[in-house]
Image (cartoon, grey):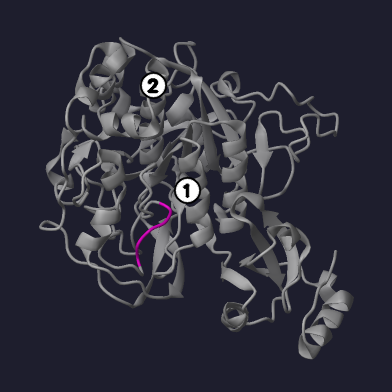
Amino acid sequence: MEYRCRGLAVIMACLFFLIAGAAYGSETKVLVRLKGDVSSLSHRTLGLGVEAGYLPMTHTQVVALPEESDLQTYLKDLQKDPDVELAEPDAPLHAHATPNDALFDMQWPLQANIGAEEAWNTTSSAENILVAIIDSGCDEAHEDIQNNLWSNGDEVHGNGVDDDGNGYVDDVHGYDFFNHDSDPADDYGHGSIVFGIIGAAGNNQVGVTGIAWNARILCLKVLDSAGDSNVSTAVEAIEYAIRQGVKIINMSWGYSPGGTPSQVLREAIQKAQGAGILVVTSAGNGSAASTGFDNDEDPALANYPSSYPEDNIIAVAATNDSDEMAVFSNYGAASVDLGAPGVNIYSTAMGNQYDYMTGTSASAPHVTGSAALVWALNPTLTYDQVKRLLLETTDPIGSLQGKTLTGGRLNVAKAVAASPAAGGHLLETDPPVYNVAASAPSLSSGGSGGCSFQMDGGNPAFSGFFTWSGIFGMGLLGLALQRRGLKLFGKSSAK
């Protein structure tokens, strides 16, 4: 590793880390972008930090600090450096739900709620649409998963060689970015359930049915066995998905950064946007009191990546079998697009089993699977056209009015029927103009807060607060003017 130090004090610090740098294992990490020649970023040491990775699409270096270092002091020093363009924490991420073992009716959303059976009369396959699940991995040997796994035809399984030269050895069905190996096996259970909701093999006389019976799903592991990760790991997986040519990315996780969301994560989503990729995200699971947050109201509590304004994002709240918004679900008239089932969702589970999940983590894959069906039937559509079909065909739900952009719950049957290939004419009409300023509260300025995540089997109980202080203030109308709907619908008004 190359160490480049500037100034006497920094030289002394670098000498210390040349001797002791290998002694610390659980480092705090910082994301840093330098000005000027980006080609030198991958082997540059800044101050007390040690280079620990590089994210090429955003030209960002991951810098590791020893345990005893003060993160905020280091960040302030970096931000004063004239050679530094960006410096932010490598924020931790958390899954938005875990499976539970309660015995309720299996797959209630597909039986009637979102119109899946009706949609299947028109189409049930999405084998021409590559979907990436960036999550805790998946059970590759599962009877309802294995046939729908993406396979890298340019890579030879198990030979220890990077056959396709993409920098990842033996990435046959995906990759484990958390442990940096070729086995994206699920040791948390979250990703396997998400997989089944989107694309468990259908009509095969075993197990459950995904929304897309025949799918091509790329399994990218970023969450550890506790459902946690960090921004740099997620960004590396997003970059990999972009290079593989995916059309849709499902991200059923997030974090509440206390008002200062990661610029690097946002830029990775912008890179996906530039590649024409739809990103489906969960809106978050609220607080320790089992009450969802308004992602628009307080920047200290807002959930990311669902609250980024990029128009390739679909943010999803959770609804229950009574067609009401789940009590734990986050919401936001400007930042959350629609609702989808997220309570007691039965799906594939690790260990070749089946289990239930509750949370917005289960809601997002319902939208992802529906998007895959619509796009597979209409392969020439753009991501914003697919998004419009999904958003404008929702069923109005009273509890979602003023709480989401559309005020509605996903209906895949209507989305399919409204698409050009099914004879629909929705995309030939003028899109609606959403105006949420009158119905939603204004954003507050300043403050700090945190977001907790559902970690207790299907009960709406939450744990694991993570809090950062920070501020970013703007009125809701100003936010809405920048929201995804502005670009999606081409109107100079609020989303």
Q: For label 1, count other residues whose C-alpha is less than 10 Å away and answer few (under 14), some (14-19) or many (20+).
A: some
Q: For label 2, count other residues whose C-alpha is less than 10 Å away and answer few (under 14), some (14-19) or many (20+).
A: many
Q: Which mark is residue 270?
A: 1
Relative image position of residue 29 (x, y in whole percent):
65, 67
Residue under the point 44% across and 62% down = 463
Whole-angstrom CA distance, mark 1 to mark 2, is: 24 Å
Relative image position of residue 351 (x, y in whole percent):
60, 33
> Based on the displayed image, in which of its 4 quarters is residue 443 positioned?
bottom left
Q: What range of the chain is rendered magenta?
A: 301-305
* Residue that lies at the very extreme toward the front in this rendered image: 36
Q: Is residue 302 magenta?
A: yes
Above or below, comparing residue 57 to residue 160 in the picture? below
> Magenta: predominant secondary structure element?
loop
* Identity, as a three-letter code, of the amino acid under mark 2: Leu
Residue under the point 53% across and 31% down = 246
Q: Nearer the viewer, residue 127 or 435?
A: 435
Q: Which residue is mark 2?
A: 373
Residue 116 horizontal side relative to residue 463, left or right:
left
Residue under the point 62% across and 53% down = 233
Residue 310 horizontal side relative to residue 6, left or right:
left
Which circle, 1 or 2, is nearer the viewer? 1
Q: Nearer the viewer, residue 190 or 131?
A: 131
* Identity, as a three-letter code, of the amino acid under mark 1: Gln
Residue 427 horizontal side relative to residue 200, left or right:
left
Relative image position of residue 103 (x, y in whole percent):
38, 34
Above or below, comparing residue 31 to residue 57 in the picture? below
* Residue that lies at the very extreme toward the bottom in this rendered image: 8
